Amino acid sequence: MRPIIIAIDGPSGAGKGTLARRLAALLGYPHVDTGAMYRAVAWKACHDHLPLDDDAVVSALSREAQIEQDALGIRIDGHDVTRDIRTPAIDQAAAQVARLPGVRAVLVARQRAMGAGGVVMEGRDIGTVVFPDANVKVYLDASAEERARRRMADAAHTASGTGDVARVQDAMAARDRSDSTRPVAPLTLAPDAVYLDTTELDADGVFAQVVTLVRRTQNEPDTGPASS
Ligand code: DC
């Protein structure tokens, strides 16, 4: 079967990670969490005490850094940062570096290079910028309350267990605003993406709907490569 590119976008806590992992396992494709790439760059910039608003400095870091991602987690220049990138401080730092055009250009080029053999890629600009010709585009959304609740229940994130839903929801809203209003590659719904509101859906329900979409696409005649 021809390899396909599946783009999953949406705000944090909408269920992108769970869906992307399951789809990648089903199809035998790599799962690329592009948010983790922005987080790893932010972690390294903080670790090296670099100014998070200096595009030249942080894009040089993202160009030179070795970033490896697999089912076990993510490493940057040999540091396993899988856990350390899921903290409220890195939430903020990642949103800051994600605003820098030079950093985005470097990471988008890296992400495009990962699509050749088929990929499930999640982020904010996958269907709009990274792979505008992706074979399947899904935009996952959920109410702000539900997304904050999911973030609290996410054991991988240190904000879980704090019991402070209102604070998590406020911080999430601020980052969503930053992601959606930045001048470069803001979070927007691609016109040809399938919009799924997952507020009332469990992970199985979301997965079943998207698998139906994927199977339909796989059965369509090949109209050429999806990667640009
Ligand atoms: O999905 P996440 O919360 O791990 O993403 C971390 C930050 O990176 C968040 O502020 C959104 C940003 N991001 C982005 O700008 N573009 C992407 N493709 C993925 C994430």
Image (tube, rainbow, N blue to C red):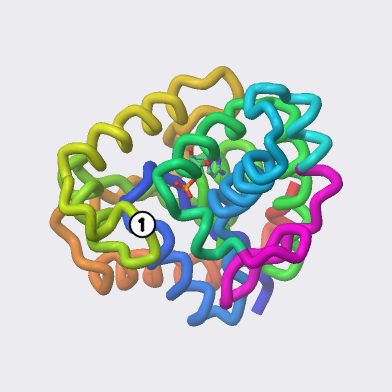
Q: Residue at x 55, y 58 (%)?
A: 33
In the rendered image of this protein, does residue 52 appear above or below residue 64?
A: above
The residue identified by callout 1 is 158
**Residue 116 lies in quadrant:** bottom right
Magenta run includes residue 65 = yes
Pointer 1 local density, CA inside 10 Å: few below 14, some 14–19, many at least 20: some
Magenta run includes residue 216 = no
Q: Residue at x 25, y 42 (%)?
A: 168
Tell me which amino acid carries mark 1.
Answer: Thr
Residue 119, visible in the rendered structure? no
Residue 193 position within the rendered picture, expressed as x and y whole percent measured from the top left = 44, 45
Q: Secondary structure at mark 1?
A: loop
Q: Residue at x 59, y 61 (%)?
A: 81
Residue 152 position within the rendered picture, expressed as x and y whole percent measured from the top left = 24, 56
Residue 212 position within the rendered picture, expressed as x and y whole percent measured from the top left = 37, 70
Q: Residue at x 51, y 48 (%)?
A: 123
Provide the residue span drawn in magenta. Answer: 62-80
